[in-house]
Amino acid sequence: MSANVLRITLVMCVGVMMTDSQSLRKKIYMTVPQLISSAGYPVEKHRAKTPDGYILQLHRIPAGRRTARRSGSPNAKGKKAVLIVHGLLGSSSDFVIMGPERSLGFILADAGYDVWLGNLRGNVHTSHQTLKRNNPEFWAYSFHEHGKYDAPAMIDKVLNMTGLEKVFYIGYSMGTTTFFTMMAQRPEYNDKVIAFVALAPAVYLDNMRFLANFLLKTVNLSSTMRARGMLSLAFEPGTLDFVVSSFCATRNPDADMCMRLVFSIVGEDYEQNDWDMMPVILSRFQPASWGQLEHFGKIAITGVFTSWEDGLWGAVKPYNLSNVAVPVSLFYGENDQLTEKSQVLRLAAELNSTGVLESLQPGCSCPKFNHLDFVFAKDVGNLINKPLVKHINMLIKKYDKD
Ligand SMILES: *[C@@H]1O[C@H](CO)[C@@H](O)[C@H](O)[C@H]1NC(C)=O
Ligand SMILES: *[C@@H]1O[C@H](CO)[C@@H](O)[C@H](O)[C@H]1NC(C)=O
Ligand SMILES: *[C@@H]1O[C@H](CO)[C@@H](O)[C@H](O)[C@H]1NC(C)=O
Ligand SMILES: *[C@@H]1O[C@H](CO)[C@@H](O)[C@H](O)[C@H]1NC(C)=O
């Protein structure tokens, strides 16, 4: 009885939301190529194959809106290629979802870059040659494999398709972890990268030690879930959409439960929270393997940027950050509680000691700037992405000798 009442109430809430913003709600279910072409940009799909059988879709925006309108069949001849790699629970979607005025993928394309949006194994744009997604083997990976196989395969694909010798790499959060684990394991990829921009880099996570210990040791979360047959930390898009539209709809910081929960992990920033977009963003969250979470947990618990072959409680084997040989620009959030400033400073000191630190700065001189703001801030276009394009222009001039 009471369950039914609750259900009816929830359905009514969703109904109200739907009539409120039909077109926004469509964005929850659009594919990334649909998002790109409906914004007026050319789009291409490419597939990178990893040596261990994963197939990763790359979404390419070879030209900006104006070029596309003018020339009909845009191409990327003579352009510099930029590969953007997403974070945990993310996908290529994160760099177009806020639209042409705000999202990095579009802004870079309009600035004359050949934009490649990567996808790391596990998200909806990836598959495996033989393993189905309901096979536990499909999920037996961490960002160790993202770095060892996925990023190299994507870089090679970009270079092969463009004929260029080097690509510019931008990573956000776990997309930066991927970069560092790549260079530690496959330093020859330094020769294929012009420079690296790291947004909210996730390398040291001492600030998450308590949470990691609690979830992985006390609650035994990943082992218990695995034992119960839950293959990954996954969200059914329909369910997520339903929950999010029901509980994330108050639009009032005093009554809000949903964003408060999110903010408890990434840092609170109601100022830059886009209430219209949040249901879309949260509903598009992608699965993560338990191995990814355990690996981050191991780093948080040990305080070492360690490999994970021996498992969560196994031997600690530091990744060799001295293998990074390309210029690295680090951007942190003043109020990022996940990849905290103090932890980024520690990484900066290490990269500085080997001479590869190009710059270290706040993504925005905004005291509330949190982890998600790097991609989803209400004003992310002006606060982050437009200045970032200038920074990238400068780096290309300085380091690309083509
Ligand atoms: C791309 O890969 C194909 C197949 O391996 C190869 O034949 C071609 O020469 C490559 N192109 C470039 C520009 O590397
Ligand atoms: C964690 O859960 C797994 C699977 O249920 C179990 O085998 C293991 O003993 C548990 N570990 C601890 C420390 O409770
Ligand atoms: C780490 O890499 C650097 C540069 O590639 C090398 O000189 C150093 O010996 C390596 N350190 C370890 C512990 O392997
Ligand atoms: C990097 O090292 C140089 C020389 O040791 C020092 O002057 C500079 O302040 C350092 N930069 C950072 C961000 O640590």
Image (cartoon, grey):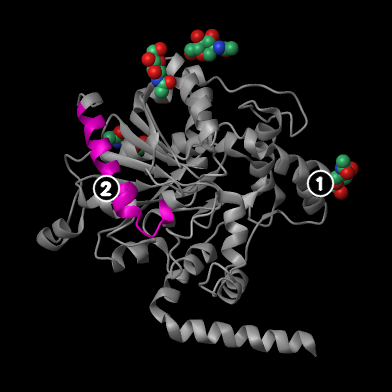
Q: Is residue 338 visible?
A: yes
From the top left corner, tell me how far across and down residue 400 is, in percent: 23, 27
Callout 1 amino acid: Asn
Magenta span includes 178: no
From the top left corner, tell me how far across and down residue 195 is, in percent: 33, 29
> Considering the numbered disc 2 on the image, is that residue within a helix, a strand or a loop?
helix
184 or 15: nearer the viewer:
15
Callout 2 amino acid: Lys
Occupied quadrant, residue 4 = bottom right
Ligand 4 shows up in the quarter that is top left
Task: Give the extent of the magenta segment.
Answer: 375-397
Magenta span includes 393: yes
Q: Is residue 287 visible?
A: no
**Label whose residue precedes the other's in the sequence (2 or 1):** 1
Residue that label 1 marks? 220
From the top left corner, tell me how far across and down residue 197 is, in percent: 37, 35
Residue lying farthest left?
70
Residue 114 lies left or right of residue 35; in this view the side is left
Looking at the image, which residue is at 65% across and 39% down? 208
Q: Is residue 119 above or below residue 342?
A: below
